[in-house]
Amino acid sequence: MSTSAQEEVDDDDFDDTIGMFEAAYDYFDDNPQNFEELLGDAKKPLYPNCKNFTKISALLKLYNLKAKFGWSDRSFTELLALVRDMLPSPNEIPNSMYQAKKTLCILGMKYEKIHACRKDCCLFRKELSDEDECPICGTSRWKLRKDSKEAMKNVPAKVMWYFSPIPRFERMFRRNDIDVYLAPLVDDLKKLWNDGVECFDAYQERCFTLKAILLWTINDFPAYGNLCGCTVKGYHACPICGEKTSSIYLPKGRKMAYLGHRKFLPRNHPYRKQKKAFNGKPELGFAPEPLSGVEILAKANGLQYSFGKKGKKEGKKEKNDGDLSYSYWKNKSIFFELEYWKHLHVRHCLDVMHIEKNVCSNLICTLLDIPGKSKDGLQARLDLVELNIR
């Protein structure tokens, strides 16, 4: 039995595609015409009597290949033209990358463009949404003309594109100044914890209130310091040990070294008594007790700090001198605005995969004495002599 060019594809796979778009209906409240156009493209066969692809499914597969293999827009346009000529006429393959983008942009994730201070002091949102200057540093919100230095109204100097996690959760069921840019995320996390969002469970065919909690972050060590508000370099670089970090400065290599790792071993571990294999001394100490979230919050509440880049005339940012227990904290983490954050036993996790790769690379390069990558150099040997380490 033949079918016309206007007949919709009725394969089970395409029923899933159409169902996906129908489930996204709520996200087109502002423009239902776009939804109808998108749904029509999801049902339209790629060419007359085509049983395997619709306009949208074919375009999505081609675009996924472009993203996967890094094709340029120009090469993708050439490919579209070739595929269009190879398929029976008429067909629904777009003429160019521009036409493909016009079709797919309707599928784009919702986002919010938030103006930011060019020095990262604040975001122009909520009570600052109508301000023309940063209330902290006085910098103009708008770009300045090169000739007259006059502000160009409605042309922001810096913009943050914020993608809220809430729509992503709903679809599942159908630097130090980084805290400034995490504020919208924390607002959404508060909403997910306190009120939740209404979602529809397609399997059980019922609505429910979805609530979510941020258990921890996973990041590398520099990002660890930015997110938890502590320093990760210098004499007190360990966020767990704090002021009890075992560290020394190597004058020849001009680097910090962190020792005393044997204190984390069990009390009766044989490595604790070995001298020659380590620093010539037995290890009698014990690992420091990690600070709880409540203790960290108490310390952070006593800090004096401000966000944003400081100009040369303004001087350096405030330092918390005096009490050593405060010296390694830079600022209060914005995640402490979440009422449950201080009660979490683990708040930040290190990305072990990349750390293992770096440590393994350093060990292998040193053992194989690879030029330019080995850590066994003259300065390292001189530092070992001063430390009386074999």
Image (tube, rainbow, N blue to C red):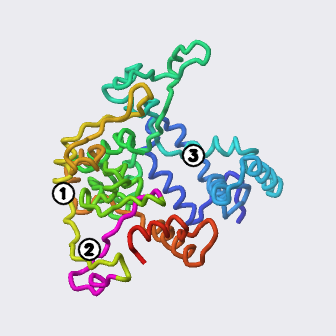
| 194 on left or right of 229 | left
Name the residue carrying label 2. 263
**Rendered residue at 54%/61% (across/down):** 15
Where 139 falls versus 101 (above or below)? above
Tell me if 77 is positioned left or right of 192 in this view: right
Front position in the image: 189 or 343: 343
The amino acid type of the residue labelled 1 equals His
Location of the N terminus by quadrant is bottom right
Q: Residues within 10 Å of mark 2 (few under 14, many from 20)?
A: some
Q: Earlier in the sequence, mark 2 or mark 1?
A: 2
Viewer-nearest residue: 204 or 339:
339
Tag 3's secondary structure?
helix
Over which residues does the magenta segment extend? 254-275
Report the residue marked by disc 3: 38
- For discs 1 and 3, the disc positioned in front in the rendered view: 1
Residue topped by disc 1:
343
The residue under the point 58% across, 17% down is: 145
- 132 left or right of 358 in image: left
Check if mark 3's residue and mark 2's residue have beta carbons within 8 Å.
no
